[in-house]
Image (spheres, rainbow, N blue to C red):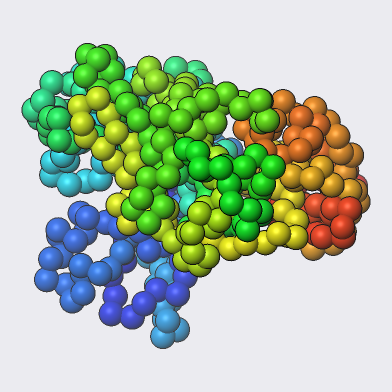
Amino acid sequence: MVLVKGWVLDPISVAKIELYVDNAFFHQVNKGLPRIDVLEAYPNYPGIQHIAPGFQTGFLASRLSNGAHSVNVKIYFADGRVFELPSGGRTINIDNTLNQTPFGNLDIPDLAAQYNASGSFPVSGWAADTDGIGRVDVFIDGGILQSAMYGDARPDVGNTFPDFPAANFSAFIANIDTTRIQDGVHLMEVVAYDRLGLSKLIGRRQVQIFNNETNLKPFGYLDEPKRDAVLFGTRCNITPVIISPPVNFSSHITPVRGWALDLGTRQNLGRVSYVELMIDGVRWVSTDDCAFSTTFNTFTNCYGLPRFDVQRYFPTYPDSPRSGYMFTLDIGALLALGVRPGNHVMKVRVGDQQQTFTELPGPQGIPVFFECAENRVAAVQGFIDIPVSFDYVKGNVTFQGWAANERASVAAIEILVDGDFIGVAQYGFPRPDVQQANPFLANAINSGWRFTMDTTKLSNARHRLTVRALDTGGLRTEIGSVDFYVQNITAVP
């Protein structure tokens, strides 16, 4: 990979930047990137604090023959001017027999003189290599601390390096448990290794570690419901038996779930002690109500449920494999008890054994709307598993995912590409993972769908897959959309 980067300052805004190699146009250059070094070099330039003057791109050296080549960029300003940089081009020498080291960037921590860290501390950025990335390691004071999780989507990096499809999935993240590090100032380094063993320092930062009981609070996330969700209840006029929590399992149930962790587990001083569901500041359900539900064949109102997705991002945290919580919320029962329909605030409070607590997703909670809908049919829920966003596919590819609702009334799964109806997917494949995660959905155990498509019928370009579910009542629900790229080999005549 040949990196091309620089900066430009001008009173007139930049409209676009183009890359040229040997006087031939290659592609547009990603612009508007921060350059702290330029800010420090020109502190008195008008508006410098609000300008992002950097640009960066790259191209595969394998596109060129070995030997000397000329590289330049053309900067197009909004007033019509065109500026060539450098004038006459810059000569580079290509040697495709050499193996380059990885390249990338450390985004967090940023380039602050010293970064303060406590509790769980994310270290993230991106790394790429033409031979593939083998691993990314985080070092503290010269000793390896842990390896980062690698391979998440970075479409911005993919846009910067359009020659290199793997850049779309070049993100790394390591969630560091700072309680494993002595308080004080430390040198943190991130090193990327390619699959052939070559390595490169991606970034170096100074971090100040400071941990005490007050800043080692629990942390986590509220996965669902989402902000501004409309939550409906049934059997709203039937006075339920006053129990804790108020729930009628023959009513519509809204799951409230997420995950939470707490540091200090290694010294048995931390650990999540309780989780509570709060509506308008009042506790309605707690993990004190944890029990196995024979209706849903799973534990409800509990903490400690499997969350292997969380474990993937927090591999050094002992509780991460079972960091999930889930509550059963019966909106109809709450309305029957006198809770008014309309706007409410929901949040989840997580406490630890040191009497500290955190409110998820934040102290303000999320706005939700309660309504009674006796005859409402819950829309189909589902997900597209394959392809993932910005995936590259070719030949025959099998799109797959799942779809289910409360009444087991899914009639058909419709597949659309670029807005055009393509066909109906096969439905009814076993999905025990969906059953475990969604015990409230009828027939979730057999909710899988699959559709095989010949991508040679599509152009080698970006396309959008849209999946719709049709139920027996005629209601169509869009499960989701995913953008993907077709990359078939074009036959040479």
Which residue, as the protein is rendered here, is positioned at the far bottom? Answer: 79
- Front in this rendered view, residue 145 or 133: 145
- Residue 73 shows up from this direction: no
The image shows residue 407, relative to residue 85, as above or below, that is: above
Residue at 71%, 39% (x, y): give it.
Answer: 441
The part of the image, by quadrant, that contains residue 87 is bottom left
Q: Residue 247's x, y, as percent? A: 57, 42
Q: Is residue 321 left or right of residue 54?
A: right
Residue at 38%, 39% (x, y): give it.
Answer: 276
Q: Is residue 345 left or right of residue 216?
A: right
Residue at 28%, 68% (x, y): give it.
Answer: 51
- Residue 270 shows up from this direction: yes
The image shows residue 358, relative to residue 376, as above or below, that is: above
Residue at 47%, 59% (x, y): give it.
Answer: 339
- Front in this rendered view, residue 298 or 185: 298
The part of the image, by quadrant, that contains residue 440 is top right
Q: Is residue 41 left or right of residue 367?
A: left
Q: Residue 199's x, y, as percent? A: 38, 23
- Front in this rendered view, residue 20 or 283: 283
The image shows residue 50, relative to residue 30, as above or below, that is: below
Q: Is residue 203 left or right of residue 198?
A: left
Q: Residue 70's x, y, as percent? A: 47, 53
Q: Residue 56's x, y, as percent? A: 41, 54
Mark count: 0
